[in-house]
Image (cartoon, rainbow, N blue to C red):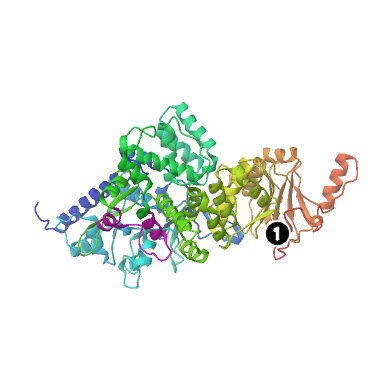
Amino acid sequence: MAEPTTNQEKKDNLLNELRAKYTSLYKEVTSFPGPENSDYSIDDLFIKPHLEYYHQATPVKLFGNPWHSLDSYRNCFNYPTGRPAPRRILEGPPGSGKSLIALKLANDWCRGGSDSPLNEIEIVILLQLNRLVGTMPFFAATKQLLLPSECELSEKDIESILMGADSVAIIFDDYDMYIKQHGGDESEIKRIFEGEMFQGSDVTITATDTPKNVPGNVGRVRIVGLEDWSRDEYIHRVVGVDDNASSEIKRHLSQNGILADLMNNPVAFSIFVHMAQNDTELPTFRSCTSFFSYVLKRCHHTISNGTGLSSQLSKPCAHHETNHQGLDRLAFEALSEDNLRMIGWNKNEVLQRLGPSFYDHYVQAGILTEVDIVDYSQPSRFATFCHKLICDWYAASHIGRMAQLTGNEMDLRQSLSRIDPSEHQYVFRFACGQDPSTGDRILRYLKGVKDSEQLRILCALEQRGSVDDVKPEIVKLFSKEIQMWSLHSALLQRSTIELMEIAARNHISLSSLSLIDCLPRVDRSERKLRLGSGLSIPVLQTLYSLVINENLMISGGELAGILTFAARCSELKKLTFIGCKLPQSISMSPALSTLKSRNAEVLCDSEGVGVRLDFQFLNLDNGHWEVVGERRMRKERETGAQTSEEPNNNTGQPTGEAEAGRRDDKSCSIM
């Protein structure tokens, strides 16, 4: 192959190599474990996540939640409010699909379709930073990660081409992990994102959390899980026009409501859908542990004989399936707080620790996967888990073994403290489910962890194996008011929502839910309350009282959406607004009629002191607000008898609102 000589030839060569690399990376992706899944392409497996962008022009105290929905990942570069700043962050928890979106953006650019947000960009550089060992100048990293070894282009050539290009877009995948490991002031990758290099170029990073000291003009997009419409679309893509098959998969999903939180994870959902399509004997799972145990057993059996769970494993495969202490330790070490590197190890190191036969079996089963890693010395092969949840499973196995073998309680607590429950809650849940005999020791440890009350119940559910076995704890928890604050950790909010869903599905009453500074808004389906944290509260059929305690303005449309959500909670009798600025009236709607039919009340605390005599009531017949005197006279006219508006408890406010009502720093007014 002749060495390119002119600048244009060098640019053409670079573009060809980039397109070939992105296409190759795109084809390599597998979405979930199991050798039988190798026939699926990334397009077959990609589930469109729900995305939101941060609208910086939204004054939070006036208009509430500043996060707004995006219809597609392709709109990350062009929000409905106009083109954002040329620096942006794509945020999302581990395994939510950030890297997949980054790869799809690069592949869209390769195809050059009109729907690609980068179709007007001349050169796109996607660096998967988890494949980079140590710090490396940007142009060297570009050459090492994206160009084949035989390519004649030098680092100087790449610099010249990029600096002279009409437009450049750069995507740094796994930026936050790279900065934790290597980030210093001298890192060119960090300087590029912060605008010290390539000031005129478009730069996107993916990260689990927003990096520290990010300039205010940086755009933010986040992944907040899966929506019902994206799940339905994926199911139809899998089964085609077969409505019966689609209905059967949805039936399996409804029967496995215990997996609701897991089904927000794209990989877990795709695993379930393909199993439900192909496995006529798919059981109903009683816990998340039983689900993952079934998934991994299926992987081992398929690689052994390709005929499913009904066949016997060969002796070597059976041994590898049940004896994985070395892999457990690797997983535990990878998730420990003192580990700053990516979840992965040099292949030769893993072979030495696990043995070639074990390693080959787990790679063939799809549980482990291999990636190319580069540094200045030479490219090397790394082994990693196919997904973060799979790593959680094997780390949990190590925790269970420690709980078995460690007699001293303090020693066990010290070991367990290396895993952060707020980042790795499923490690503790799986550990309790895998070995119920040691679950009590793990539950005692969690009792001393902040914000872990709800997580302990979820761990006990995994340990005992069914909702019925933890029903007394759930009933006790929700017999009192549950408060969710914006300052609560993501772990506490997420586990609270999951338990509320479990309670509602099992006909357990939810006495009162108070949302305080959570910036709730109803999603477009009007079946979920989206919180400022990105988490969603679904319609809860057993919820009695909902309190929205916010110092913000709620528009007529937003109020109508909240009323529709409340009407869909079939047992809700009381909806209270504290501190909100509300419209003077609301248009009549079926929601008002539904609330009226069940004698529900919609109230606004006009003074913020929680005294019922100071409340304003929404007249569900005409959509206007009334003060207590007006409401009393209207009711007397309707009934022909005297009515009383006495407080219904000793605190002088509705049951379940005592704490929220004491927040007298807020006032509620009707606009």
Q: Can you say whether 227 is above or below 668 in the image?
A: above
Q: x, y percentage for residue 191? A: 34, 68
Q: x, y percentage for residue 255? A: 54, 35
Q: Quadrant of residue 401?
A: bottom left
Residue 212 covered by magenta stretch? no
Disc 1 marks a residue whose amino acid type is Ala
Answer left or right for 439 relative to 184: right
Answer left or right for 455 relative to 665: left
Q: Nearer the viewer, residue 590 or 388?
A: 388
Q: Nearer the viewer, residue 89 or 490?
A: 490
Which residue is painted at 25% across and 57% down in the image?
A: 348
Answer left or right for 415 relative to 354: right
- The answer to whether residue 93 is seen in the rendering is no
Range of magenta residues:
328-354
Q: Nearer the viewer, residue 433 or 103?
A: 433
- The answer to whether residue 664 is seen in the rendering is yes
Q: x, y percentage for residue 353? A: 30, 57
Q: Identify the residue under disc 1.
A: 660
Which residue is painted at 43% across and 46% down in the image?
A: 72
Which residue is painted at 19% across and 54% down in the image?
A: 148
Q: Which quadrant does the C terminus fall into?
A: bottom right
